[in-house]
Amino acid sequence: MMHMSQWEDHDRRAGPRIYLQLRLALIYPQHLGCPARPMYQGKTQGVGISGISLLVDYNIYQEGEVAVVLALPVAYPGASRKVATATAEMTYAIYSSKLNAYQIGLAFREFRGNGKALLEAVIQHALSQERVKGTSNRGGRSGVNRLRNSQPLGR
């Protein structure tokens, strides 16, 4: 018999995960008879190199793979915006009555081009900013926080 305490603090993610709101588009597979592929646009809630989570007003969960396009922050003013594109599998959908929203988890399966390297750079930059802000202002909270209390995105 398994006890719930066995899963406490168990995280199977491949790397750090941070609270970072990135704009995204989820593109679902083409359905027979539909003129266009269904798409959802929104923002991430948590970001990691192995997957993302997002909050949505209604349940957009669908089994199988979806394409994910993440709009990454610009490196400096005037720079062009880069995107990371990947295929991902939706791993969970949880309704939170406290937030009155669904939390959807996606696990990345494969990145296109240099998407993984671009996302890793964004995560590392955000983590370094968190460390700098954390040491200079101990009483304040930075805009980027590590998430510690959600379910694993990976298998």
Image (spheres, helix red, strand yellow):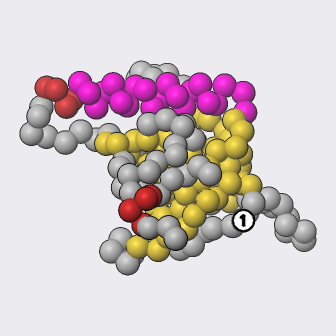
Farthest residue, direction left: 139
Which one is in front, 155 or 74? 155
Taking the spot 64% from the left edge, 44% from the top edge, the residue there is: 108
From the viewer's perspective, is 124 left or right of 89? Answer: left
Which one is in front, 18 or 24? 18
Residue 58 position, x and y percent, is: 53, 74
Residue 135 position, x and y percent, is: 16, 26
Q: Is residue 131 magenta?
A: yes
Residue 38 position, x and y percent, is: 73, 63
Taking the spot 54% from the left edge, 62% from the top edge, the residue there is: 104
Helix, strand or loop for the magenta stretch, by majority: helix
Q: Which residues are magenta?
A: 112-132
Q: Is residue 88 magenta?
A: no
Q: Amino acid at mark 1?
A: Glu
Q: Which residue is mark 1?
A: 63
Farthest residue, direction bottom: 97
Taking the spot 43% from the left edge, 41% from the top edge, the residue there is: 17
